Image (tube, helix red, strand yellow):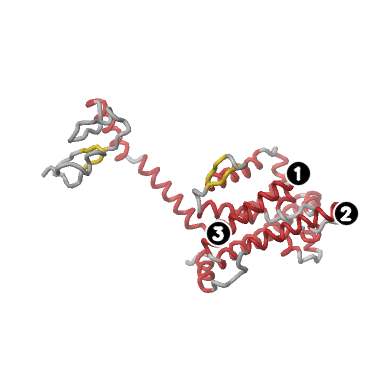
Amino acid sequence: MKTPLHWLDRFSYDHPNFGLPNLIRWVVLANVTVYVMDAVTSAMGSMPLSSFLAFYPGAVLHGQVWRLVTFVLVPDSYSLTGLGPLWFVFSMLFYYYLGTALEQHWGTARFNLFYLCGVILTVIAAFVSYGLTSAVNPELAALFSMIPITIGQVNFSILLAFATVFPDSEFRVYFVIPIKAKWLAVFYLAIRVWSYMRLAGPTLLMMLPILLPLDLAAILNYLLFFRGEVGNLFARTRMANRHRNSAQTINFQKAQKELRQRRGYLHKCAVCGVTDQDDPNMEFRYCSKCNGYYCYCANHINNHTHVQ
């Protein structure tokens, strides 16, 4: 049975010109424009532009369908008020870098598909959240209808995708602390988990219908494109654990320990006689061309007479 990833890959291959080149550049420019316009209109005492563009499920159900598309233009900083314009600048540069790198690696069609799937899943998740809160607590649904849905979940999936494609790419937090992309993604996931754990029981049950569908949308978008990589990672981890806990590995490690205790060393060079006890940092290898089980240090593995 062909998976959704197969159809997405096939579509990207058959339609290499699909989508908008440098998509993330235009998204960032739109976010910056809306941010500046909001600052100007707020200073003038007028309604901010973002209030007409943001995605409110209740407003869409009342006919304002343009919000299904225009919410992409509203920066995620509006869901993190109080962090200031400096955070906004850093976040725009950060996601511009992530999106550009992914598009260069994938191609325009695949990156556009990834972004489009993230937007569609976010919209679906928002309506699911709105429906769940309406069924459980109409007052909470009224509150939820006033909270704008941003592209934060799409950005979240972009971070996960970048950390998978470029796991060892390094960032400088506050221009000082080095951190690799894979650990940055793990740290962000830990923050998301902690945001659930810190809620008290009744509060968690009340907020779960709002928060969980949106987070699951970002993870589902990621899994649509990286299910194979995630499956391979779990398979490798399972095989490593199986090998580590196998009887053969345990018996081998036990035999090595007993041999070290009996002889005082485990490896000894057949040329110079140095042992791993004499030099713990020395590397030892066994020569496959010698007729027998002969060990050599790093200095003599390629510089000895083969025993025949």
Task: Please tell me whether mark 2 sits on a helix, a strand or a loop.
Answer: loop
Residue 185: x and y in percent read 56, 47
Three-letter code for the amino acid on which mark 3 is drawn: Leu
**Residues packed near mark 3 inside 10 Å, few (<14), some (14 to 19) or many (20 plus):** many
**Residues packed near mark 1 inside 10 Å, few (<14), some (14 to 19) or many (20 plus):** few
Task: Please tell me whether mark 3 sits on a helix, a strand or a loop.
Answer: helix
Q: Is residue 282 above or below residue 288?
A: above
Three-letter code for the amino acid on which mark 2 is drawn: Met
Q: Which residue is mark 2?
A: 44
In the image, what residue occupies the spot 51% across and 57% down? Answer: 226
In the image, what residue occupies the spot 27% across and 31% down? Answer: 276
**Residues packed near mark 2 inside 10 Å, few (<14), some (14 to 19) or many (20 plus):** few
Q: CA distance from mark 2 to mark 3?
A: 39 Å
Residue 211: x and y in percent read 68, 49
Q: Which residue is mark 1?
A: 82
Q: CA distance from mark 1 to mark 3?
A: 30 Å
Q: Is residue 27 left or right of residue 39?
A: left
Q: Are marks 1 and 3 in contact (CB under 8 Å)?
A: no
Three-letter code for the amino acid on which mark 1 is drawn: Gly
Q: Which residue is mark 3?
A: 102
Residue 301: x and y in percent read 22, 42
Q: CA distance from mark 1 to mark 2?
A: 20 Å
The nearer-to-camera label among 1 and 2 is: 2
Q: Is residue 167 above or below residue 296?
A: below
Task: Please tell me whether mark 1 sits on a helix, a strand or a loop.
Answer: loop
